[in-house]
Amino acid sequence: MAEFFINHDKIAMEADKPSINEEWLTFKTTGYIGYFETIKSPLKDENGNLIGVVGVARDITERVKANKELEKNEKWRQIVFDSIHDAIFIVDINTGIIEDVNRQAEILIGKSKDELIGMHQSKLHPAHLKDDESESFKEAINSKDFVRQTEIINADGVVIPVEITAHDIFKIGDREFVCGIFRDLTELKNNQLALIEREETLQEAQRVAKIGSWKIDIKTNQLTWSNQTYIIFGIPIGKTITLEDFLGVIHPDDLEFVANSWKMH
């Protein structure tokens, strides 16, 4: 340990200016191992001649350990943060500036973390939604459970449907933030459109063939008919139909047969 101090005394004298150093030290008499910060400054007489070194040593072991623990916790936080499949944007509620994002946010927008941090949150949305999203942001920071479907625009100019959720604001120091979670709805919307197209194709096929289809909720006896089934029975399309309603339009000569056939199923 003596060699450590002597070496840094020389560094301070040769540099002719204060020297700050940090190093783990072991005390021979007690066996204590600590991390110390030392500040060495050249000591001169009234004529400016170097006569020695003045040194101050401070034990910063606990601070260093705390910093290492914080670093470890930050690594774990970042791992969890980046493993979430939805995009996350941390935004200052007073400025609207994005302060942090996860990996999925980079993928969704097509920009790097460095590009996104410092951007105003309104820039995430198409220009025609600027006013709506300004009001929406105010609502998000004043609501405990905010949910909204809207659109964002990525770096290539592609508009993407998303669902945004936000919860209570949180503080770091004297600043307040809101965490916005953006879920990409592209696949869901595409599936919904495909389902609508299939339904329209089925309805058209039934219209041409003059056949209908139906299904029943066995708990409520409520029937769901295709449009062509309504047309066949001469009932307004969309009217709620129960099994009893269906039996009510059956010809009396066939009623017993239909009712018995239904019971068999």
Image (spheres, helix red, strand yellow):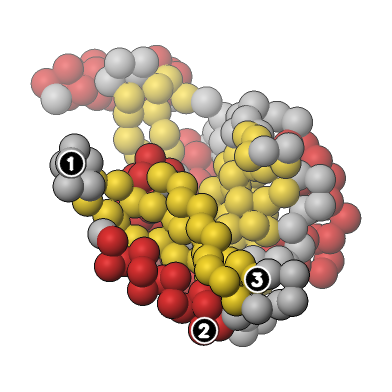
- 2 or 1: tag closer to the N-terminus: 2
Q: Position of residue 22 (x, y in %)?
A: 40, 61
Crowdedness of circle 1 by 10 Å Cα count: few (<14), some, many (20+)? few
Q: Which residue is mark 2?
A: 14
**Image height of 170 relative to 105, above or below:** above
Seen in the image, is 13 located left or right of residue 43? left
Q: Residue at x 27, y 67 (%)?
A: 3
Task: Determine whether the residue tagged by mark 1 lies in a helix, strand or loop.
Answer: loop
Q: Residue at x 36, y 45 (%)?
A: 61
Q: Which residue is mark 1?
A: 29
Task: Determine whether the residue tagged by mark 2 lies in a helix, strand or loop.
Answer: helix
Q: Amino acid at mark 2?
A: Glu
Task: Determine whether the residue tagged by mark 3 lies in a helix, strand or loop.
Answer: strand
Q: Quadrant of residue 209?
A: bottom left
Q: Which residue is mark 3?
A: 44
**Image height of 212 relative to 171, above or below:** below
Seen in the image, is 217 located left or right of residue 248? left
